[in-house]
Image (cartoon, rainbow, N blue to C red):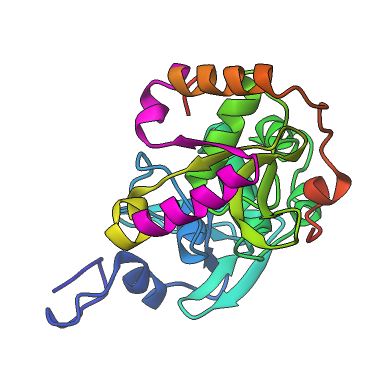
Amino acid sequence: MTPIHGVRASSRLRPTLVEAVAVVLRGDQWFSHTTAVRIWGGPLPRSVPDDVVHVSTAADRSMRRAHVVGHRCTRPAVREHAVGRVSTPARAWFECAELLDERELVALGDYFVGRSGLATVDDLAAEVHPRTRGARRARAALERIRVGAESAMETYVRLAVVDAGFPEPQLNLEVHDEQGIFLGRVDFAWPDRKTALEYDGDHHRDREQFRHDQRRGNGFTADGWLVIHATAADAVCPAVLFERLRQAFAARPGRTRRVSGAERAGSPGSGW
C-alpha cells in the first residue's frame, strides 16, 4: 500500500497518515497546528479533519503533498517527539488560534496548562505576538483559561455558566465535612453557598459508578451541600440547568468570588 506518494508500507502495518508523512519530513520541517495538538493529546472539535496533516518549515519551500497543508514559519519552536519534530505545546496552541473559535481555544489551553502539565499560561502568553494571525482571539482566550478542568466539556460548561452571569466557580474542589472527613471532589463549586455543579459524562452510566455517585451524594446532602448535575443533553438546551442554578443561588446567597492569580497564571493550587 502507498499511504502517501513516496512511502510504501505493508498492508498489515497500516501506518497512520502522520507516521507516513514522518518518513518524508526534511530536517527543516516539523508537525504543527492541529496535527501537533493531536500528537500532544489535546482536545479538538469533531469539525477538525483527521485526514489532513499540518507541516511547517523554516525554509523557503513548504511541503506540497496530498493530505498535507504546508506552512512557513520564521520563529520555530520545536520539540522532539517519538513521531518526529513537533511544535511545542504552547506554539501549537497559538497556531490553532486561526483555526479554532475562542471556546475551543480555551478548552485546548485548559488542557495544556492543566491535566497534561505540558505548558503554563505564561508559556501560552509568550507565543502571542502582535499583528499576527489569530493574536486577538488568542489574547481573548488567554483571559479565560484556567487550571483545573479535566475535560473539554468541563471547560465548555464553565464558560457557559459564567457567560450566563453566574460567579466564577472553583474547579475540582476537594470537599470535607465539619469533622474533616473527605466527601469527594466536585467539578465546579461555590463553597460560600455550599453549592456544586457536576458534569456527568457517559462513564456515569456504569452501574458501579452510579452506586458510587449515590453514596457520595448522600454525604454531600448530609453536610448541607446542594449538588446540581449536568449532562450532554444540557449542552443542547442549557436553560433548565441555568434555572436550577439561579434557584440555588437565590436560596443560598453568598459572596462573589474573584479568580485568584494562581488560577490565571497556572500555579498548582448561550450553548456550550
Whole-percent x and y of residue 57? 57, 61
Res. 81 image quadrant: bottom right
229 part of magenta stretch: yes
What is the magenta range?
Answer: 210-239
- Looking at the image, residue 77 sits to the left or right of residue 238; the answer is right
**As displayed, is residue 203 above or below residue 134?**
below
The picture places residue 35, in percent across and down from the top left corner, at 45, 57
Q: Identify which residue is drawn at 63% across, 22% down.
A: 163
Which image quadrant is residue 20 in?
A: bottom left
Q: Position of residue 228 (x, y in %)?
A: 52, 34
**In x, y percent, where is residue 148?**
66, 52
Decide whether the magenta segment is chiefly helix, strand or loop: helix
In the rendered view, would you say 236 is above or below 183? above
- Location of the N terminus (image quadrant): bottom left
Residue under the point 71% across and 31% down? 140
**Residue 243 inside the magenta-drawn segment:** no
Would you identify the image quadrant in which residue 257 lies?
Answer: top right
Residue visible at 66% across and 62% down in the picture:
182
Residue 62 appears in the picture as rendered: no
Front-most of 109 and 180? 180
